[in-house]
Image (cartoon, helix red, strand yellow):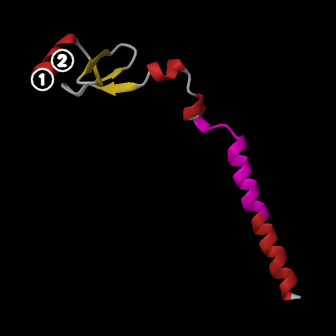
Amino acid sequence: MYRLILVSLLLTILYYLLRQMFRAFKTPLQDGQQSPSTQRPDDEQDQMIEDPVCHIFVPRRIALIESIGGREYCFCSKECAGRFRNEHPI
């Protein structure tokens, strides 16, 4: 008799675990967030980037993007970009 109760308890637990797992795949993320694979290009442009010189965060869409030494850097202004180039010669 106790075997039947144990098996039914284990099956019930397995059912609830599987149900939670499949719900996670179906439900959208909370608070209007999107998963990284479904990000729109606009969302990527609104990403905040830190200036490596003055450490100010600016949106990627208005940042000054320069490739220095084969690497891409984002700056808040031309002055910061020039200062970075002077401090880090190629």
| Disc number placed over residue 80 in the picture, else none | 2
Q: Is residue 26 magenta?
A: yes
- Is residue 33 visible from the viewing direction of this image? no
Residue bearing the label numbered 1: 89
Q: Secondary structure at mark 1?
A: loop
What residue type is disc 1 on?
Pro
As drawn, 54 above or below 81: below
Q: Earlier in the sequence, mark 2 or mark 1?
A: 2
Locate residue 2 relative to residue 43 in the image: left or right: right
Quarter that holds the N terminus? bottom right
Q: Position of residue 73 (x, y in %)?
A: 28, 23
The residue under the point 13% across, 26% down is: 88
The quadrant the C terminus occupies is top left
**Magenta span main SS:** helix
- Left or right, 1 with reference to 38: right
Quarter-wise, where is residue 33 in the image?
A: top right
x, y percent for residue 36: 54, 33
Seen in the image, is 9 located left or right of residue 38?
A: right
